[in-house]
Amino acid sequence: MFQTMNIAKGVNVHVNETTQFKTINFSLKFKDKLTKEKASARSILANVLQHSNEVYPSHTALRMVLDDLYGTSLYIDSSKRGNEHIVTLNVETVNDQYLSEEGVLEKVLNLMYIVLFKPNLENGLFKETIFNREKEAIKQRIESIFDEKTRYAQQRMLELALPEHPASIPANGTLEEVERVTNEKLFEEYQAMIHDNEIEIYAVGDIQAETISAYLKEYFKFEDRETSVDAPSVELVQPAETRVVEYEDMKQGKLHMAFFTPITFRDEKFPVMQLMNGVLGGYAHSKLFVNIREKESMAYYVSSSYASQFGLMFVLAGIDSKLEEKAVKLVLEQLEEVKKGNITDTELDQTKALLVNQLREALDSARGQIDIYDQYMELTEAFEPDYLISKWKAVTKEDIAQAAQQLSLEMTYFLSGKEDDSVE
Amino acid sequence: MNKVHFDQLDETLYKEQLPNGLEVYILPKKGFSKTFATFTTKYGSIDNHFVPFGGQEPVKVPDGIAHFLEHKMFEKEDGDVFQQFSKQGASANAFTSFTRTAYLFSATDQVTENVGTLLDFVQSPYFTEKTVEKEKGIIAQEITMYDDQPDWRLYFGIIENLYKNHPVKIDIAGTVESIQDITAEHLYTCYNTFYHPSNMVLFIVGAVEPDSMMDFIKANQSEKTFEEPKEIVRMYPDEPIEAAVKERTLEMSVQKPKVFVGIKPEALNLSGDEMLKHELAAQLAYELLFGRTSDFYHQAYESGWIDESYSFDYSLENGFGYALIGSDTAEPEVLAREIQHTLGNAMEKWPFGQADLDRVRRKKIGFFLRALNSPEYIANQFTRYAFNGMNLFDVVPFLEALEVPDLQAAFATVSAESQRSVFTILSPKKETV
């Protein structure tokens, strides 16, 4: 799928030469260790670099160039995976061949260089007004989670169940830490990102791998660097309380349950756990959906998800606030069924078929190819979909039951409507 | 089978209208593993007042029924259709909008079987009073979930402000109360009226071989019998041009206020090429005024009136439409005033020339080419365009033909003060201790 070239120590270029898409996609991923401090600073940094630079000193000037380059999309985001924090420069541009104009690609590469290497500085630091404005923007982004009750409930649950654990550190950092970031600190973080971080560069489209990597090597001047992102630790501390109820002014109750599993992404049983999660609550044929939504009519959404990097599984449901106890009981009953191996052949086959479909489908987008490859290259250098598909095919009901038996309930969190809201 | 090649886009579209009236489109995509299919009826939440198939007198049906019907289509006497799709490795879904109900799946294997399942389940209604009752709990939870989402409330709040009579102001899913009135008989009435093949479009895009797929679809359809198609009579109330309510505020639990300025368009009776030209011209005009390169955006962002949630949009259907501009903001009054000010200034003296048009046109062409990588975008948008008599693949040539006066003319129909409204969501005032 991807050809990999090393352009400096710790800097790899992965290219997929394909005519599948009408556009060319680039992702430059800067990887560092995840801490609250780093996540907070690096989120501001992503915004500052995306705002403007030395050549295009205002947001408007930069956006006008992008519009002129046929609406080339360019954004920088902050994400996390296990113990890693990742700042990604994402660029997508149209392929010249659909345009009357040539040379668009080279202009786009040059712009990517400017965005990364020619920041908008003033007295050796980021321009103060931009720094302040983008710091404010990140604070607002963090605060806005409160308005999306499902995301908010999930975050509250993680904070309570896994304090100080990478699983509960938001990719955008925290309000307190964002507040503490100074312009000096941000500039240090920028230097570290460019000079010290492990970098993975991806390119997907109708392009030549040699040409792209030669260009990057000549113009992007990344020096050698040591790469030492640790494997995530899965040490979990027992939460202070195992059931927490909080109240907000809202109509629907949000049930979030966290389970611990010793099986992580790096475990050979990882594909088994993917199936286990699928059978329990991953799909519209799964036990939770069929029993809690279809049979009991008590939820519109109810599902489970497997956070393989952290060894966690979550169950989420939106229910009437009065039905918390009943919902928890039903979830645990269905999990019990899986533990006992009460899984039909149909359930097993459906889950396998949908996992395969989901993977193949994801590979039909350039972004999907990059994300999947970037994740799985940790497990196998030359990742191909068949690597996983053959493993899923071999999984039995007994394997799934065994994986389920290793789950332990860490916390039940319920975000409920107002307590006194008992009007029928 | 008709075959149209679009040279500039390097796409070939296969098309046929079957004897029962169903329009079928197939678009093969080179290099793709997945196939995405949508089976869509031109029936949405606004179609609540109509003459039923075989009837004489118009009826009014309960709010939320098109969406309710969408839910109930998945349940059959022998179980749930999701199960069948899962067995065939497909993930299936459906959605209801103001004007459409779409059933869809994506699959990387057993594509023909899945297309068969899609056609068969949508064409075999099965409703009983018992299953209808059972669904009410699920949909009530869905409605409640949306009730807690401030962005959804903001969106519907502004549409309610703009429209006085038109059913676009009714929430697509209805209310917890209105769905209680829905019966199996209602569902059959709506189904029989709107799910005739002549009111539907099937679109298949991705890893699909057009000839054998078309043969399969024809065989599937010829095995079924349908009544002769009748023209569907839909009634819509008269709607004034002016916004129904100038200003309204809702209190709910949010971290920061939210505001939308909405503008109701005058040009509500367009279709076909005229509609396409108008929509693209108006979208470009709004891009120039409120896009990320606009003076407005620059000032609003630097002044802290808007944040990353800022958005603007212009969308038009037959009979209704809206332009929306808004953001989460600590200063909803200032933001609303500045948006109105920008609209008013552009009305008085149009500030844009050829270079501006060229720039936003390029941006839009680029966006369109990017979107053509997405089978979902192609299928959904193509169907929306088709229901309005437009062709999705005309977008680039139409964009290339636009002139500055076209933008100005389109903007003039979506800008007048009397057509504007403001909707704001505020946090409840904290009680002072």
Image: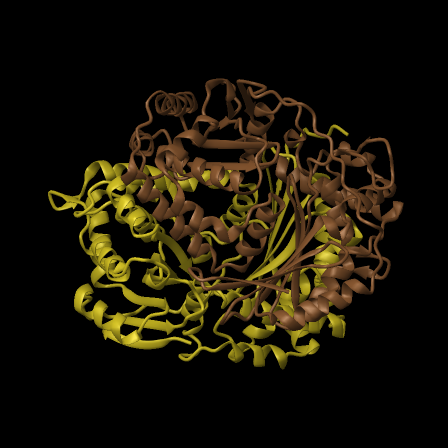
Chain colours: A yellow, B brown
Task: Residue at 20%, 64% (x, y): give it.
Answer: A220
Asked if residue A404 is positioned above or below residue B314 in the image, the reply reads below
**B396 left or right of B87?**
left
A26 sits to left or right of B412? left
Residue A106 in picture, x, y percent from top left: 24, 62
Residue A62 vs B246, above or below: the answer is: below
Rendered-image quadrant of the C terminus of chain A: top right
Instruction: Give residue B404's position: percent from left, percent from top.
Output: 35, 35
Q: Residue furthest front?
A: B2
Residue B240 vs A264, above or below: the answer is above
Q: Say whether residue A352 is visible.
A: no
Name the residue located 33 percent from the left edge and 37 percent from the top edge. Answer: A136
Q: Is residue A12 above or below residue A259?
A: below
Please give left or right for residue A262 compared with residue A322 in the image.
Answer: left
> Which quadrant is the N terminus of chain A positioned in?
bottom left
Q: Position of residue B341 (x, y in %)?
A: 37, 21
The structure residue drawn at horizontal position 42% and vertical position 42%, both measured from the top left corner, is A142
Q: Is residue A290 something that shows in the picture? A: yes
**Which of these two is toward me, B16 or A268?**
B16
What residue is rendered at 52% in x and 51% in y?
Answer: B392
Question: How many circles with numbers are drawn on the protein?
Answer: 0
Q: Residue A217's x, y, as percent?
A: 20, 70
Q: Nearer the viewer, residue A261 or B402?
A: B402
Quadrant in the picture for residue A303: bottom right
Q: Quadrant of residue B23?
A: bottom right
